[in-house]
Amino acid sequence: MLNARDLVKEFRVARREPGLAGALRGLLRPRETTLRAVDGVSLALSGSEIVGLLGPNGAGKSTTLKMLTGVLDPTSGRVDFEGRSPRADRRWFTRRIGAVFGQRTQLWWELPLRDSLAAAKALYEIPDATFARTRAALVAELEIGSFLHVPVRQLSLGQKMRAELCAAMLHRPRLLFLDEPTLGLDLEARAAFHRVLRTASRGWGTGVLLTTHDVADIDALCERIVVICGGRVAYSGSVGAAKASHARRTRLVCTVRRSADTPPPRTAPPGIEMVREGVRVVLTIDRARATREDALAWLGAGCEILAEAPGEVSTGDLLLDLYGAARAVAA
Amino acid sequence: MRSLLALLRIEAAASLADRRLAVLGAMHKLLLAGAQVLLWSSLVGPEGTTIDGGHLSHADVVTYVLLATALASLAEFPVVDTINDRVARGQAAVDVLRPPGFPMLVLAGELARFVVGLVTQALPALVVLGAVLGFVTPGPDRVAAALLLVVGGWLLATLVGWCIAIAALRLLDTTQVKYAFQGVTALFSGALVPLWFFPEPLRAIAEALPFHLLFHAPLSVWLGLAGWAEIVRFFAVLALWLCVLVPVAVAAWHWSRAEMVVHGG
């Protein structure tokens, strides 16, 4: 459905020197450097697939997303959606996609939410019956019925974000772009988000490309992740496969006789982290810096270990490993 | 077309959402127009004054001042602030992804706000002050011609504002450019002082620039101080400027689009 090949984006950035003298020099002889924000990113997304576009801050995720949506022109490389260019066929493309970009809004702040939803119907030329059906389903799933009459500016962050998602999905988009949509949401709002996205993916065949820093979103939604670091794809594949092949950290779940006997976490040797949950102790071991035996020896020095079993690496740890490995390669 | 109408409706509704702003806006217009009328009345006196196009009665002056105040937003290029704001908030990136597109969303909003401003703020001031101080109403043909010129003038001012905002995005800030244009427009459009009172060289400059089409042209038509030959010339010059500005605005949009969304995040 969506294909991007060898996307590169470069920006000309003014180089400013510090201080008043630097500012004067910049005025007389401005200097510019070329910043390569995205460096050869390729990715594909099929219908009904939910893909996480992940990476640390400044990795090039948002720039990639803007090129995929046709907002930005790539310096080189190409994007096509169902064989057509998002940029050249902007009007055709925008009718088939939906987007929620974190802090930006597609709602009219001064007006009740229902007016914005009615405007979306007109802008996307949604037939009456489809609109009524989809709106009813989304309003129920996202639990926004109680504040349809409230001006958008009076809604809480969670209410606003649910309303944004509703407006972005009323026309049943083939593809949904979500840029950190769950930032600052409470657990209920987040659960509603996840529920609706899964329903759209399975029921309507909507493909979802999601950028997020929230591990809960990834665990709940993403069948596949594309990790971008330094403008390049550091990993593309399933979370499970990444845990098996790329995780540098391992986990060991131990049961001890007395929680009070365990050593303080701050005394852990380099590469070992400990979390206590009563008599259950989870040790995270960075394999590059410590071994399983090191960890057991440190824990067992002061307390009796009754049982031990390998634990699953968390997605958060996996991402830290992927980001770290990508940085090491770049360096 | 249906989506454009829907857009105009919702933008108009959004402009009307705050009752206090509408009331304050109407009071502002009333005070401004009242002060201007007093000033000009004392300058021309009850007999009016003679200008090169004929006689300007006291009622003509009052009408000119009231209409010029009603149309004042034409010389303010509000579209520049709209675009700056949408870019600064990153809203432009979202606008680009909606079917009408950024230019249509901006222009529909501007038109809706202009019309709502005229109806809710300028018209009450016009009616109140006109009833008290006198107001000249011409025949329907001149009213129609003047209204058409106002519509064309709005388009002209919006295109000029669009070019300033969009092109200057590459310079990071458009405020100073806008202020410069506002000053030139206020002077050469007839918004502050009717062009009939200008010395000949200054008036020649004003007529060579497009800004006289915003105030001087429709108000001359309304007051009967422009003959039909001159009215035709106004429309021809307006069409010429629009023919120049539309491609410039389109080119400026294409030139600045990538830059704009980068600033917008």
Image: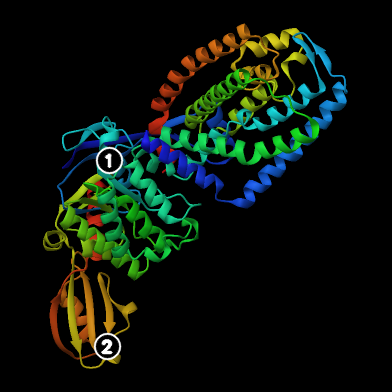
Visible residue check, residue A96: yes
Q: Position of residue A181 (x, y in %)?
A: 34, 56
Of the numbered discs 1 and 2, the one sitting upstream in the chain is 1
User: Residue placed at 67% from the left, 12% from the top?
Assistant: B226
> Number of marks in the image?
2
User: Residue placed at 62% from the left, 9% from the top?
Assistant: B228
Q: Chain of mark 1?
A: A
Determine the residue located farthest toward the front in the rendered image.
B139
**Mark 2: secondary structure:** loop
- Residue to which mark 2 is pinned: A278
**Mark 1: secondary structure:** helix
Q: Which mark is residue B219?
A: none
Q: Chain of mark 2?
A: A
A232 above or below B35? below
State left or right for residue A38 relative to residue A155. Answer: left
Q: CA distance from mark 1 to mark 2?
A: 54 Å
Nearer the observer, B53 or B173: B53
- Residue to which mark 1 is pinned: A95
Answer few, some or many: residues within 10 Å of disc 1's Cα (few below 14, many 20 plus, some between 14 and 19): many
**Residue depth check, mark 1 versus mark 2: number of the one nearer the observer:** 1
Which quadrant would residue A201 be assigned to in this image? bottom left
Which quadrant would residue A259 be assigned to in this image? bottom left
- Residue type (three-letter) at the residue carrying disc 1: Arg
Q: Quadrant of the N terminus of chain B?
A: top left
Q: Quadrant of the C terminus of chain B?
A: top left
State left or right for residue A7 relative to residue B65. Answer: left
